[in-house]
Amino acid sequence: MSLFNDTKLAFADKSTQQLEKAKWMFTMIQYPAVTNAGIKALNFTVQNNFPFVENLVRNTLFEQFCGGVTREQSMQVVKKMFKHHIGSIFDYAIEGKEDEATFDHTFQETKENIKFAEGNPAIPFVVFKPTGFGRLDLYAQVQSGNELTSSEKAEWEKVVGRYEETCRFAYEKNVILMVDAEETWIQTAVDNLVNRMMAKYNQEKPIVWNTIQMYRTGRIEYLKEDLERARENHYFLGYKFVRGAYMEKERLRAQEMRYPDPIQPSKQAADDNYNAAIGFVMEHLDRISAFFGTHNERSTKLIMDKMREKGLENDSRKIYFGQLYGMSDNITYTLGEQKYNTCKYLPYGPVKDVVPYLTRRAQENTSVAGQTGRELALLKKEIERRRNLR
């Protein structure tokens, strides 16, 4: 789509050296065999503390997909993007750890991010991942309805306490708090917790927002039920809509455990479902605000068209757009130029601890049809444009 093809605008903040490095990296990522072998080697070297690896990661994947080691360091990126009317969402991107000390640290980081965001238009949201506040297996136990042991009950009370205190703090600071999505076998437990927080803290406006993965089946039905609950109990809804991130894992588990596949049967079906969610939001703006996380140009254009049809200003507080830092700058910077509310998810954290997040990003780029090819084509186009200016 020509609307999103202005590479001069898209890469305004990137040096030619950074573009060349990104081109090399996306070239590697487009080959699944190379990506998977590289991920295995990376995980092995990180686990065994090979001395050269941290610098290698810092200068490649980390530089492309993360804002910095700390939120303070990441502020350089935040300020640079905000000049283009692009907000930032700090994401403390530590994954794969399941001890109480790490959960407490992530909880404190999230509260610090809320403090940091208070009154700062460059940071319109704060986010946390449910498995950053508690063990995946514990959520699964709660969702299954199995009787918890006394120690598990105490552990779950800590998880609920972290949600409660974080949501209350966001409410007091008037900062929007988004809760990320997880795998289907724990998402209902997450939804139930988030719904409780919404009912409590969204009486005046949406402060607590949930995440809906539209590559799942049954999500439009869920949205209808959620809206009915909100109307009955007089609170507002905030949603982040994404397509989803766990397709292979979800399909494999459903097959192994012999339950219906919870994922849409095709990419087209997932796209149709996502676009149906756009239509649903636009019909219920009296009660719903939405953040559309998408790298899909057609869905982005559809949202823009629907906003015009509804008479919404480009910067209406009802609608936000978002992409991941390091990807789809052609979409983000075009939206920013036209003064839409648009943001980048900006992960940060110690290089070694962020490796699981970075490898997931690399794998997602490999599995999402056309994504890496689009990134490469845009990078090559801008590098060529700059060469021709010499």
Image (cartoon, rainbow, N blue to C red):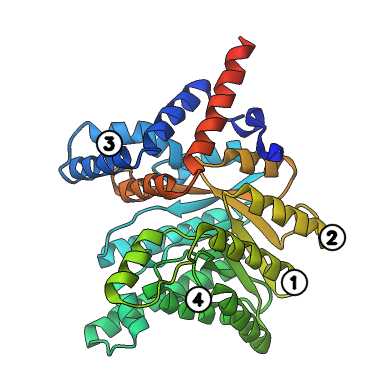
Residue 170 lies, in percent from the top left, at: 55, 67
Residue 77 lies, in percent from the top left, at: 53, 38
Query: Is residue 281 visible to the viewer in this orientation of the structure?
Result: yes
Q: Nearer the viewer, mark 4 or mark 1?
A: 1
**Whole-Å distance between the Cαs marked 3 and 1?**
49 Å
From the image, tell me which residue sits under label 4: 194
Q: Residue at x 37, y 47 (%)?
A: 363
Q: Amino acid at mark 3?
A: Glu
- Secondary structure beneath dot 4 equals helix
Query: Mark 2 or mark 1, which is nearer the start of the sequence?
Result: 1
- Secondary structure beneath dot 1 equals helix
**Whole-Å distance between the Cαs marked 3 and 4?**
36 Å
Instruction: Using residue 93 as the reference point, say whether residue 295 is left or right of it.
Output: right
- Give the quadrant of the N terminus: top right
Instruction: Using residue 210 as the reference point, say whether residue 105 is left or right of it.
Output: left
Q: Nearer the viewer, mark 2 or mark 3?
A: 2
Q: Amino acid at mark 1?
A: Glu
Residue 58 lies, in percent from the top left, at: 35, 35
**Whole-Å distance between the Cαs marked 2 and 3?**
50 Å
Against 227, residue 250 (above or below) is above
From the image, tell me which residue sits under label 2: 311
Query: Mark 1 or mark 4, which is nearer the start of the sequence?
Result: 4
Q: Nearer the viewer, mark 2 or mark 4?
A: 2
